[in-house]
């Protein structure tokens, strides 16, 4: 396996990680921002007020995007396993 192939594989793996994590992190960021604005407007400084809604929204996002995330990861690993025979040529 050449250096260029290793770099390409690493770049692709990082991109897949970003794609899979983006829906969950994006929803957590949006909900955290909304709750932070609400806390600043009402002067409520309760830690669980930001944690529990973010957890709930992330579960909903996982239910919505979970099938797509699994499909992306399965496709990536399938391509990885297809490359294995070419490593020893």
Image (spheres, helix red, strand yellow):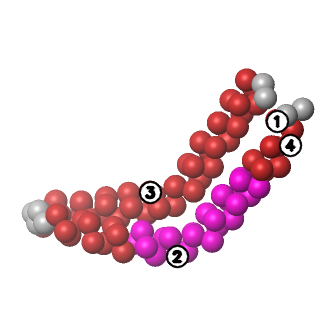
**x and y percent of residue 16 in the render?**
63, 49
User: Is residue 41 in sight in this rendering?
Assistant: no
Above or below: residue 36 compared with residue 60: above
Q: What is the residue that sits farthest to the right in this orientation? A: 89
**x and y percent of residue 41 in the render?**
16, 63
Q: Is 56 placed left or right of 81 in the picture?
A: left
Distance (Cα) linking label 2 and label 3: 14 Å
For label 1, the crowd category at 10 Å Cα-Cα, with few meaning under 14, some 14 to 19 and many 20 or more, is: few
Q: Residue at x 57, y 69 (%)?
A: 65
**x and y percent of residue 89 in the render?**
90, 32
Of the image marks 2 and 3, the number of the one nearer the N terminus = 3
Q: Residue at x 52, y 55 (%)?
A: 22
Above or below: residue 72 compared with residue 15: below
Above or below: residue 69 compared with residue 21: below
Residue corresponding to mark 2: 63
Residue corresponding to mark 3: 25
Of the image marks 1 and 2, the number of the one nearer the N terminus = 2
**Highlighted range, magenta:** 57-78
Distance (Cα) linking label 1 and label 4: 5 Å
Residue corresponding to mark 1: 87
Mark 1 or 3: the one toward you: 1
As drawn, the label of residue 85 is 4
């Amino acid at each position: 396996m050449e250096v260029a192939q290793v770099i390409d594989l690493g770049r692709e793996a990082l991109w897949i990680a970003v794609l899979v994590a983006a829906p969950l992190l994006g929803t957590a960021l949006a909900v955290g921002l909304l709750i932070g604005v609400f806390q600043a407007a009402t002067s409520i400084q309760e830690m669980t007020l930001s944690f529990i809604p973010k957890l709930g929204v992330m579960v909903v996002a996982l239910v919505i995007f979970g099938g797509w995330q699994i499909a992306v990861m399965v496709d990536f690993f399938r391509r990885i396993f297809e490359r294995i025979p070419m490593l020893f040529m």
